[in-house]
Image (cartoon, rainbow, N blue to C red):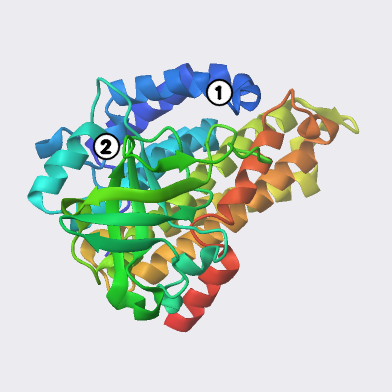
Amino acid sequence: MYNFQLSEERHQFQEMARKFAEKEIKPLNDKFEDDWETHRYMTQVLKKAAELGFMGLTIDPKYGGIGSDGMTTMAVLEELAAVNGGVATVIGDTWFAQTPIIIAANEEQRERFLRPLASREEVNLGCICMTEPDSGSDIEDERMRFRTVKTILKEDGEHYILNGLKAWPSNAGIASHYIVVATTDPKMEEKGSGILVVEKDRPGLSFGKIERKMGMAEDQNREVVFENVRVPKSNLLGKIGDGLRILQTTVAYNRLGAGMISVGMARGAFEYALQYCKNRVVGGKVLVKHSLISAMFADMATKIDAARLLVYRASWALKRKDPNRARYSNMAKVFATNMAMEVTSNCVQVMGSYGYSKEYPVEKYMRDAKIVQIYLGPNEMVQQLIGENL
């Protein structure tokens, strides 16, 4: 039986996230776009987020975190994304990078890696390095069995030597910990797969140019280059051969996060456009009183609620280890991200030229929504996975 009612603790974190977003993020929304290369405004936002404990929200109190469950995490993500989807993505991708450590690390590794990531005194971001220039989303496609991974691990005594190139990871260049998807030999498929943690100060780790994008200027994307990077074997999560399983579980836990970021962005655009249409007079009456516009808002509200419920069902299923949990997560990702693109586009449409103007926030919601249909597996690929699972 499903029960999606927020507990008192979840409600408290939801309110904390809402106040944080309104006070610390919203006043800077107009500045992030021009700050895409220096990210100096994001630095102050993330410092405040760390002080409030958001960076360690998913980490066990044993390692300095808060230890919130998936439902609480989703509630927080929605509130952040309702004000700024890019900021929600930066924080959410740090949780994404923490996931392999949480599910696969031994006790010593959890203490060594999770404690700094949960810090409230300094900002330590995570960056999960999956995608590669030549293979794109194949690495996120469980059917490919790691055959297209070209980031190579070679044993060298008590170390691995890491060589390869990763494209488009979030928080690249500003993260403290890089969670790297690699292989000893692509021909070995799953048997050669491995995931290891690379700290930011390892010699041979470098970065490409900062990508300038259509939206989400808050989220820094760069190529991550590994040139003969020596990493202790004690940084490997699990053992060689575990990488594919760890990655599949990690993606299942985090695709629903993309879904909830989409719910938040759609809700933010919807609320702004609805208020606008309650005051804008056209043809002698406010816009929202026109039957066509009213029907559009009814449809948008229904789809936002439906997407939120799909995300909560997926979160509930993951907590219970339901056998359908991966499919539910994929469904939530596809439906919610497509919904966000539709809703934000409609919000621009009902506001007319004002919706297209940078003076108003809905055009940013629309631009930000597009990438979520693509990251964590493009929706076309994820739909195939759903179909095959059925």
Q: Residue at x 67, y 35 (%)?
A: 364
Q: Nearer the viewer, residue 133 or 221?
A: 133
Q: Is residue 20 above or below residue 63?
A: above
Query: Which residue bears the numbered disc 1?
Result: 38
Quadrant where the N terminus sits is: bottom left
The number of discs equals: 2
Q: Is residue 33 above or below residue 318?
A: above
Q: Nearer the viewer, residue 68 or 305?
A: 68
Query: Mark 2 vs mark 1: which is more N-terminal?
Result: 1
Query: Which residue bears the numbered disc 2?
Result: 57
Q: Amino acid at mark 1?
A: Thr
Q: Nearer the viewer, mark 2 or mark 1?
A: 1
Q: Residue 287 vs residue 98: left or right?
A: right
Indicate the position of residue 168 as horizontal and vertical percent values: 53, 49
Quadrant for residue 91, please give it: top left
Q: Residue at x 55, y 16 (%)?
A: 27
Q: Amino acid at mark 2?
A: Leu
Quadrant where the C terminus sits is: bottom left
Q: Nearer the viewer, residue 152 or 291?
A: 152
Indicate the position of residue 316 as horizontal and vertical percent values: 29, 58
Query: Badge 1 local density, few (<14 within 10 Å), some, or many (20+)?
Result: few
Q: Is residue 168 above or below residue 250?
A: above
Query: Badge 2 local density, few (<14 within 10 Å), some, or many (20+)?
Result: many
For mark 2, give the secondary structure. loop
For mark 1, give the secondary structure. loop
Quadrant for residue 177, please give it: top left
Indicate the position of residue 322 as horizontal and vertical percent values: 26, 70
Q: Is residue 21 visible?
A: yes
Q: Residue 54 got which mark?
A: none
Indicate the position of residue 26 as horizontal and vertical percent values: 54, 21
Q: Is residue 312 visible?
A: no
